[in-house]
Amino acid sequence: MLDRFISWFEIEPASALLPYDGWAMSKFVDLGALTPPRRTRQVLCHACGDQHPRQLPLWADPEVTCGTCGSKQVELISDHMSVQIRLPWLPSTFARLLSGPTAVPMELIPERLWRLTTTTTSAGRAPVYLLRSGWHIDQLGIKAVLGQEESARQILITSSLLLNDQISTSHRIVIPMDEAIRIETEGIQLNHRRLGTVVTAPLPLWFTLEPPYNRLILGGETLVLRRKQKRFMRLLKEKHAIGFPSFDWRELAEECKYSRQITSLSQIFSDEVRRFIDSGHGHVWIRKEAVPRVIDAPPNNVELQDDQSQID
């Protein structure tokens, strides 16, 4: 049932009429996912040549005009029954299943993107979105809207697998709708295990740092880690893995037993290490790309706090 519904959900335009197939559609009409079937006529315009279906009551047939040019020079040909998909049904039902009977989804892009709920993880807020996807969507517009909603992790449930790799990021997990729900005769059923796994799973990382945590690999470069650096980077990796784009470096330094008299990250790490991490507003993060070496400048190889002769 779900595959059939997804095919209707993605049809463009969103208000398109669907020929009524009682065997395939009656259950969805009963659920409220489709409108009740109505008499439909195919309208052929002799003025502009357009042909399109229109739902018409019997008494309105003589007053029919062309939906494209407005001409009354039309001919009503084939007669059948049609329905329309009720787009709000899926996000509304989805939101209630996730957050309770009074939950209401927020439409962020008309007929395209909804925020269903916001759950809480160990890393903070994790909004759950529903995307009506398809062959042609405004990726830049969708990413711009999602980018305005700051959170440690975003979960985007999409009706299609197309183009998902271009929308996903290290903190935005995209999953297909058929992994999140199923539709039974009685309505939508959540895949609680799959959604729970997505909410709690470590995020994909853009760097490699494996036990014994003595080598940070970023792009094509490797940083050799020593002593307390290993613990610091491991802790930072763990924060990135649960959705923190950055973290308070003082908390990490304190957990690594660095001196509380340290006032700057540059007192802890050499210039070589700073090529791999960046900081600002009291937070630190692993860069997306290592900063190139400055050939003419002598390297600063001092890591003050790893030297036992420094302040404790």
Image: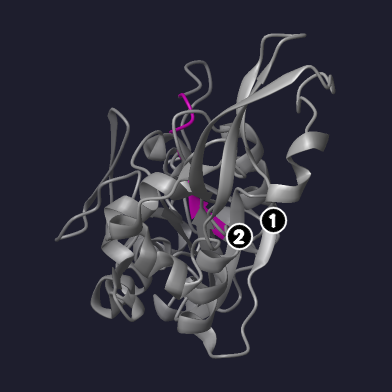
Q: Is the magenta stretch mostly helix, strand or loop?
A: loop
Magenta residues (range): 284-292
Q: Mark 1 points at which residue?
A: 108
**Residue at the spot 76% in from the left edge and 22% down from the top edge:** 68
Disc 2 residue type (three-letter): Trp
Q: Is residue 248 visible?
A: no
Q: Horizontal and vertical percent for residue 257? A: 41, 79
| Left or right of residue 43, residue 167 in this image | left
The answer to which image quadrant residue 250 occupies is: bottom right
The answer to which image quadrant residue 163 occupies is: top left
- Pick the front one: 156 or 96: 96
**Residue at the spot 47% in from the left edge and 81% down from the top edge:** 98
How many numbered dots are placed on residues in this image? 2
Q: CA separation, marks 2 and 1?
A: 5 Å
Residues packed near mark 1 inside 10 Å, few (<14), some (14 to 19) or many (20 plus): some
Which quadrant does the N terminus fall into?
bottom left
Disc 1 residue type (three-letter): Leu
Instruction: Kindly state the secondary structure of the residue where label 1 is placed.
Output: strand
Q: Name the residue under label 2.
A: 114
**Residue at the spot 37% in from the left edge and 35% down from the top edge:** 162
